[in-house]
Amino acid sequence: MKKLLSIVFILACMLCLVACGGNTENVKVTDYTSEIYSDAEIKSAIDVTINYFEKNFDGCTLTEITYLGDDKLDDWQEFAERNSADNVIVLVSSFTVDASGGDGSLNPNSTYTNWKWVLVRSDGGAWKHVDHGY
């Protein structure tokens, strides 16, 4: 029974990847350290970002993602303030774009590096994606 459930789970995951827009199948999560956020908090922000990428970046493959770092957060605090949030976290990623150019706003057959993802939250709640780009 466990084997059958495992097979069903794997097939469901594969179906989700096919149905989703962006590809995140082999994304590398680079090591990070933080004295502000726990590993679980950073992983949660990464999960929100990956979910957003899968739904909105058709024709793109996320290759790497990591936390930008504690020392850079002051530069991004205005996003928390603008969104009436307590915390901001910034992730940085790399991804490739296929011949379609994603939604048409990205360069076809290209690689984007140092792409920022800005997320906010209040009262230790769930992270919310509020911006992305360079």
Image (tube, rainbow, N blue to C red):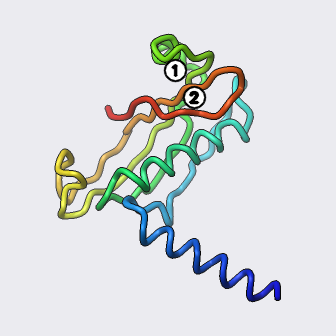
- Residue 69's mark? 2
Residue 53 percent coordinates (x, y): 42, 50
Q: Quadrant of the C terminus?
A: top left
The reply to whether the C-beta atoms of the residues labelled 1 and 2 are less than 8 Å apart is yes
What's the residue at 54%, 13% (across, down)? 84
Few, some or many C-alpha atoms within 10 Å of disc 1 (few <14, some 14-19, many ≥20)? few
Residue bearing mark 1:
72
Q: Give above or below for 33 relative to 120.
A: below
Residue 35 percent coordinates (x, y): 72, 25
Tell me the amino acid under the disc marked 1: Lys
Specify whether 74 is left or right of 104. Answer: right
Q: How far, Cα to Cα, is label 1 from label 2?
A: 6 Å
Regarding mark 2 in the picture, which secondary structure is present there? loop
Q: Quadrant of the N terminus?
A: bottom right
- Compare residues 50 and 11 and report the one nearer the observer: 11
- Compare residues 92 and 100 and report the one nearer the observer: 100
